Image: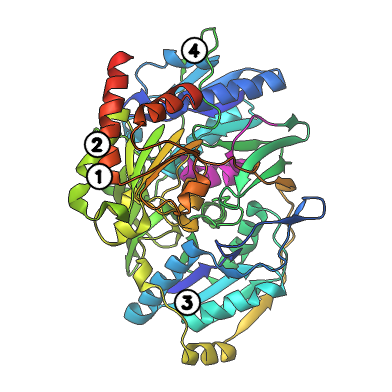
Amino acid sequence: MKILVCISHVPDTTSKINFANDNSKFDANGVQFVINPNDEFGLTRAMWFKEKQGATVTVVNVGGLETEPTLRKALAIGADAAIRVNTVPTDGFSVAKQLANVVKDGGYDLVIAGRESIDYNGGMVPGMIAGLTNANFINNCIGLEVEGNSVKAIREIDGGKETLSTSLPLVIGGQKGLVEESDLRIPNMRGIMMARQKALTVVEPVATNAETISTKFEKPAPKGAVKLVSLDNLDELVNLLHIEAKVI
Amino acid sequence: MSVLVYTESEQGKFKKVAFEVASYAKAVANQLGTTVTAIAMNVSDTSQLAMYGVDKVLNVANSQLDNFNAKIYANIIKQAAEKESTKVVIIGSSANSKYLAPLLAVELNAGFASNVIEVPSNVSPFTVKRTAFTNKAFEFVQITTDVKIVGVSNNSFGLVESSGSATAETFSPVLAESGMKIESVDKVAGKVSIADAEIVVSAGRGLKGPENWGMIEELASVLGAATACSKPVSDLGWRPHGEHVGQTGKPVAANLYIAIGISGAIQHLAGINASKVKVVINSDPEAPFFKAADYGVVGDAFVVVPQLIEKLKAFKAQQ
């Protein structure tokens, strides 16, 4: 089985988010970048397929040179090879088109992406890859088993979960549950050394048009201080929620 | 040219979100000077939609659609969009709507903006405001394609009633190949889901053990709320994974989020801070959640929660 894991290069959750160029562009200055958490759960599941079922695992990112350390980290975790599509992403749809092209070129059976990236939170790339490559698609995937061509998967639904059977080729939008947090791997020295020898192929992008254009960013207004209610005056809390906040 | 809105249903009845997206669609239709057409699957009575500004309902009746399938549903919405020559499609932010949206975008070759929180700030160029960076910022996005898809964030627009009537039309689209079979569904009946809830009551390690969740369930039941929990609680197996809210768990965009015994780690806040009003109950006044909350009580959950339940019961009895 040939697996492609899509890796988004995102600011660490604890990063301060700032914007540059008159609030039109994300300011990467001083920001620590990581593998998108939803993608990391998928990558870890891919490692399981590699180790137990002999799958080959390629990781891919659409981005500039600055994203290569993130791909190297994925290689250090155990992916066999990496691909970087050499273009700065503008919108979800064009990223999906780039990735769909990589999928078609490489003949991958299973594409594992995260349900959404924690930067732009578009949540559209996995489904669009499936649509563009005519593959089956499972979003919010929290369990995945593959035998030959047959797939059994679990999808988180609002208020529960459902078990699905389908077949390859398949794209999933993965999340925690595919593996647990405790299964995530920290690259060891051997992995880091080996990652340096692994192939990181740079491919040029296909021509796409942006379907959406990000024009401006705003930060939420600073929050007022919390209103503290004393322990022996909970009637006040009920009143505030009813009269002031109007939520009960 | 009418605005098309996908109105979600469950077991033959509209979900509340259907009325919110219909209200939103009406506002967009007013901006564009056009009407609203809704697409519904297997809904026995669609007349309620008229109250939220829908002019025409395409109701698909087909038992094969009783279970949601993203590919088939997306394809039906596409057929409806073509039939209505729609330029703007409105959907919600449920797990199912987010599942079908990218498939629909490919089918319609449409730009898609998710997590949209306001009516378009401009219709030419078509510009919407959405949340990004896990609610640490807002992004203004122009959708430049001929057909546009807007995913409205839960509880962001609310219900707006309008007068009028809706014509109902039976719509019989061709069903696509699903490529997928549902083997089983595991869903707790009669419980408000986190996605559908207006109020979410969430608890953390401060509760000391799973045996203490009775008062959380009771508080939720008094408020008609969904129950949720922090990541450590789900990792410890005290509560099911489906209740975990936060960056790697379920997102919450409730009107009221009550956090009990949750310190407020940044990963937790990232998942819940789209909620409008936040209340924290924690014995540690230094807990970071107090900086993110609107209202707070410094106190032991085992003292505060039972009292709060009594106060709320008295309040509800008066209403």
Residue A113 placed where, x, y %?
Answer: 50, 62
- Crowd band around label 4 with a 10 angstrom C-alpha radius: few (<14), some (14–19), many (20+): some
Please indicate, yes or no, whether residue B51 appears anywhere in the rendered image.
yes
Please indicate, yes or no, whether residue A80 appears anywhere in the rendered image.
no
Q: CA distance from mark 3 to mark 1?
A: 49 Å
Tell me which amino acid carries mark 4: Met
* Left-right relation of A173 to B213: right
| Mark 2 touches mark 1? (CB < 8 Å) | yes
Q: CA distance from mark 1 to mark 4?
A: 44 Å
**Which image quarter is the N terminus of chain B in?**
top right
Q: Which residue is mark 2?
A: B306
Residue A17 placed where, x, y %?
Answer: 65, 57
Q: CA distance from mark 2 to mark 3?
A: 52 Å
- Residue positioned most to the top: B164
Front residue of this view, candidates B56 and A213? A213
| Mark 4 touches mark 3? (CB < 8 Å) | no
Label 3 SS: strand
- Which numbered mark, 3 or 1, is in the foreground of this view? 1
Number of numbered markers: 4
Q: Which residue is mark 1?
A: B302
Identify the subunit bearing mark 4.
Answer: B
- Image quarter of residue B125: top right
Front residue of this view, candidates B153 and B6? B153
B98 part of magenta stretch:
yes
- Magenta region: B97-120
Tell me which amino acid carries mark 3: Val
Q: Which residue is mark 3?
A: A57
Disc nearer the start of the sequence (1/4): 4
- Which numbered mark, 4 or 3, is in the foreground of this view? 4
Q: Are marks 2 and 4 on the same chain?
A: yes
